[in-house]
Structure formats: structure tokens, C-alpha cells
Image (cartoon, rainbow, N blue to C red):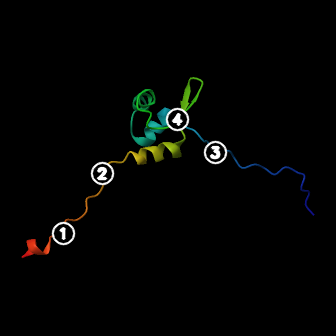
Amino acid sequence: MQDTDTPKPQAAITRLYITDKELAGLLGVSAGFLQKDRRTAKRIPFVQLGDRCLYDPDEALAAVKLLTVGGPRGRRVKRATEAA
């Protein structure tokens, strides 16, 4: 019989937030771009802890995905009248 009162080892805590320099490398933009975005447009969500600004990578990538413009164009199909 196992003793249920003994604490179980906790899983390693994964890093939840990253710095603007780390996110900039992930997105392929400069850290200055992210700093400017924080001051003006605020398109990419961030957490401010005192004078530090940190990003949740999942939230940041989701926000960038929402900014996608355009996409693949559909094939143009010739109409029956144009084909003749």
C-alpha cells in the first residue's frame, strides 16, 4: 500500500513569457519594432511587470496570425461563353 500523504514530484515549470528580443527573433522583426508597437498600435499583446515587458509566445503568434492580409488567389475559371 502506498502512502498518499507524501508529496509527488512536480513537473518542471515551463517558461511562460519571453522578452521582446526573443520574440523579435521568433517573428523575424527587430526588438525596436516590438517596442514601437507597444507604444503606438498595441497589436501584439504583452504583460508589463514594473519596467519589464514580456510576451506570451502563443498569444503573440495568434495576434500576428490575425494580422494576415490576403492569401492565395482562386483559380480563374473560363466561362462557357468565353471558351467558345
In percent of the image, x 41 and y 28: which residue is there? Answer: 40
In percent of the image, x 9 and y 71: which residue is there? Answer: 82
In percent of the image, x 51 and y 44: which residue is there? Answer: 59
Q: Amino acid at mark 2?
A: Gly
- Give the CA separation, mark 3 to mark 1: 51 Å
Name the quadrant containing residue 34. top left
The residue singled out by tag 4 in the image is 46
Question: Quarter of the image containing the C terminus?
Answer: bottom left
The residue singled out by tag 2 in the image is 70
The residue tagged with tag 1: helix, strand or loop?
loop
The residue singled out by tag 1 in the image is 77
Q: Indicate which disc residue 10 carries.
A: none
- Give the CA separation, mark 1 to mark 2: 20 Å
Q: Indicate which disc residue 14 carries.
A: 3
User: Of marks 2 and 3, which one's residue comes earlier in the chain?
Assistant: 3
Left-right relation of 29 to 52: left
User: Of marks 3 and 1, which one's residue comes earlier in the chain?
Assistant: 3
Q: Are marks 3 and 1 in contact (CB under 8 Å)?
A: no
Q: Are marks 1 and 2 in contact (CB under 8 Å)?
A: no
